[in-house]
Image (tube, rainbow, N blue to C red):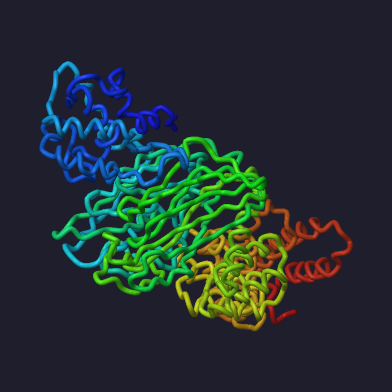
Amino acid sequence: MKSLGNALVLVVFAMVLAIGDRAWSAPQPGTPTFNRDIAPIVFKNCAVCHRPGESAPFSLLTFRDLKKHAAQVAEVTKSRFMPPWLPQAGYGEFVGERRLSDEQISLIQRWVDAGAEEGEAADLPPTPAWRKGWQLGEPDLVIRMEQSYTLRASGRDVYRNFVIPIPLTNTRYVEAVELRPGNKRVVHHANILIDPTRSSRILDEKDSEPGFEGMDFFSEAQRPGGYFLTWVPGTLPSVEPTPWRLDPRSSLVINMHMLPSGKDEVIEPAVGFHFTDKPAQGPLLYIFKLEGDEQIDIPPGRKHFSIADDYTLPVDVEVLGVDPHAHFLGKTMQGFATLPDGTKKWLIRIDDWDFNWQDVYRFLHPVFLPKGSIVSMRYTYDNSSDNGRNPSSPPKHVVAGNSTLDEMGHLWVQFQARDREGLKLLELGQALHILEKYPNNAMAHYNVGRHHHLERRYDRAIHHYEQALRSRPAFALAHHNLGSVLRRMGRLDEAIRHYKAALKFRPQYAPAHDYLARTLHSNAQMTEAISHYRETLKLNPDNLAAHYRLAAAHHELGATLQKAGRAAEALQHYRRSLELKDDSPMTLTRAAWLLATTVDDNVRSPTDAVTLASRASELTGHGHPAVEDTLAVAYAAAGDFDRAVATAKHALELITDPGHEKAIQEIRRHLELFRNKTPFMEESQ
């Protein structure tokens, strides 16, 4: 564990600290020079990308570097194309702003117009000292791909998910994550996801190349609740507001959007984790999504197309950050809140959206919004030929979709709730908000059902799960959760039907195999239960509970077969149970009884019976009457009647409750046989 506070300050303010007392102030009289006037501006606002090894196509760290591009720099700063900072001034204060003032832009123009002079060497501030490699210092854990991925030279954008098992043996708490995409020139953006199951690994194994394709994939991979874990060019790593939990046996999934460059490119991402010993405490985070995707239907040539969304907060929150998103046709973006007293509080405003420079914007200071505030988004799009970023010429009809040639309209807002109850209300509010606009939205019904499920309001949960399935009959998770509710209500046959439906649509979903096996087990359908326990363990070998339940199922099936007189099959299941569970007194006793009392010579083994019953006796401290009785029966089967008599007497002494008359009579009957040098056999009862 280490404190990252100083490291974070170094990352965010590295350029300013390196410049020291020579940080830019008002222009000095005379002709501007690089060393005195321009270098401080470039070091602070440009060099984070324009330096060796970063995403920009050339460096601007020296006078010679900048001189070669002086006219270009003057042009792109004047138009505010560079440095890339989309939010308008005065509509939210964000960490790491790269916005140039009017005075700084004017100074750059004057410098270029005057001949772009270098100036006195003594005036040059120190070159910023960025860390080499990891910007927050050496991580506690670094995870890399075992095999690199080669991005093809040409073609459409590539969306790919790289899956890497996380080598942890115990739960850790993450206070910062740093993603190094491996090839910044071709990676448009990347998201860090965590999959606690094997579902992403299974998708990876099915693909012949490293990772698997797509954005809409059906695995359990998600961003840790409430956290922005995104990389875009120019991103500086930061310490999270509160730590998040990372469990062992999870997988890291790096979701990447990559742009072919005209030649084959090697992609080798790495992720560094910084841990703390302190789990998250206090306020909880939730990322709320305002969106207008289903409103997007933009005819070709339409210059002004708008979407909107509003949400009324059910609790007090603080806003920590925002993540606006659209594609190439996006033009203007507004995010704001209207307080209960009518006051308008801006969250973000972008008047010239550029898909190539999207970012996550974290507020310099949290923005408090009281309960009842209305959070709003207003976006516009330009699908005309006047839009220089329009990817289609002539313009084409555009609807919502994940492809960059489609469109999107999202505003992700990071809320901080005061407590878990507030978090629950935000989660429920998100789902209800979607249902208000889209009553047949299957995922929203599923999320409302899940909320009621967790609150044990089972009738409401069933209603919403069923509504989700009406809209999307192949919704495996809804089938699975509906099965779980029905199982809790004792409606086992219905639960089994929905678990099987979940597996029909998603055959390798380990939780459905597990819960189906449990339900079949409860319904005394042992053979089928064993089959699904095995599938559970094949998909998730670390599921110890399934391991023990499989052993119990083998034991119970063995007992059933033993009663039915199928001794050989019963013994096979007892032995399998013992292999799985090692030492289970119940299984040891059952198997010993079978080996000692059966008349089937192919199964009967008094020596093995004594061994197993002795072990069961040791495990129970020689204090369980049924186990001691079984040991006595085993001794008698082996011909050791003296021990059999002594052990049976001990078994009788252990029964102190006169209410157990049936057990007392049974052991006395065995004792009488042993005194007469006769073993007990099942058929002799």
> Residue 333: x, y in percent?
43, 54
Viewer can see residue 319: yes
> Residue 47: x, y in percent?
24, 35
Residue at x 75% of width, y 60% of height: 625
Residue 212 versus residue 110 in the image, above or below: below
Q: Nearer the viewer, residue 114 or 178?
A: 114
Going by the picture, which residue comes out furthest to the right?
658
**Left or right of 647 in this view: 219:** left
Q: Quadrant of the C terminus?
A: bottom right
State which quadrant residue 345 falls in. top right
**Left or right of 580 in this view: 451:** right
Residue at x 30% of width, y 31% of height: 103
State which quadrant residue 456 falls in. bottom right
Residue 378 versus residue 511 in the image, above or below: above
State which quadrant residue 434 falls in. bottom right
> Residue 307: x, y in percent?
48, 63
Residue at x 73% of width, y 54% of height: 623
> Residue 166: x, y in percent?
39, 51
Residue 230 versus residue 408 in the image, above or below: above
Viewer can see residue 556: no
Q: Nearer the viewer, residue 188 or 329?
A: 329
Residue at x 64% of width, y 43% of height: 418
Q: Nearer the viewer, residue 271 or 379?
A: 379
Labels in figure, total:
0
Q: Nearer the viewer, residue 244 or 45?
A: 45
**Left or right of 131 in this view: 549:** right
Q: Quadrant of the N terminus?
A: top left
